[in-house]
Image (cartoon, grey):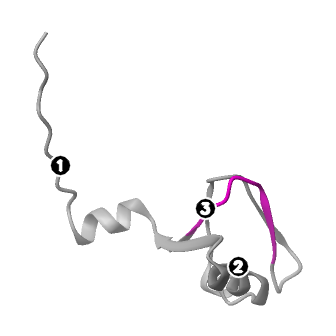
């Protein structure tokens, strides 16, 4: 399922074609359906760069495991 993320430091209200709204807080995320993704207002915000499109972290982990490396600090 696609996920949208607000890159701005302000709240955004996205108007959908179905008459519903998505209230996206600053730096917040929301799951969207394919139907909601086709909304003209959401497409405009995506093209301007205020919102980015991604996928759920669970789905991303299934495709490619995260590689982490860290150094343990001594006391």
Residue 26 marker: none
Query: Which residue is found at the position 12% from the left and 27% from the top?
Result: 72
The relative height of residue 19 versus residue 75 in the rendered view (above or below) is below
Q: CA distance from mark 1 to mark 3?
A: 25 Å
Q: Which residue is mark 1?
A: 68
Residue 44 occupies quadrant: bottom right
Find residue 27 and report its horizontal and vertical position in percent. 62, 53
Q: Which residue is mark 3?
A: 7
Q: Which residues are magenta?
A: 4-15
User: Is residue 2 in sight in this rendering?
Assistant: no
The relative height of residue 41 versus residue 5 in the rendered view (above or below) is below
Circle 1 sits in a helix, a strand or a loop, which is it?
A: loop
Q: Earlier in the sequence, mark 1 or mark 3?
A: 3
Q: Earlier in the sequence, mark 1 or mark 2?
A: 2
Q: CA distance from mark 1 to mark 2?
A: 33 Å
Classed neighbour count for the residue bearing mark 1: other residues with Cα under 10 Å, few (<14), some (14–19), many (≥20): few
Q: Nearer the viewer, residue 39 or 48?
A: 48
Find residue 74 and report its horizontal and vertical position in percent. 10, 15
Query: Which residue is found at the position 45% from the left and 65% from the top?
Result: 56
Q: Which residue is mark 2?
A: 45
Q: Nearer the viewer, residue 40 or 2?
A: 40
Residue 13 occupies quadrant: bottom right
Is residue 59 shown left or right of residue 26?
A: left
User: Is residue 34 in sight in this rendering?
Assistant: yes
Query: Which residue is found at the position 33% from the left and 67% from the top?
Result: 60
């Amino acid at each position: 399922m696609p996920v949208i993320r607000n890159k701005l430091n302000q709240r955004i209200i996205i108007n959908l074609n179905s008459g519903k709204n998505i209230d996206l807080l600053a730096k917040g995320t929301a799951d969207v359906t394919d139907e909601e993704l086709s909304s003209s207002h959401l497409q405009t915000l995506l093209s301007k760069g205020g919102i980015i499109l991604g996928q759920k972290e669970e789905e991303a982990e299934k495709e490619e495991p995260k590689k982490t490396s860290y150094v343990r600090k001594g006391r």
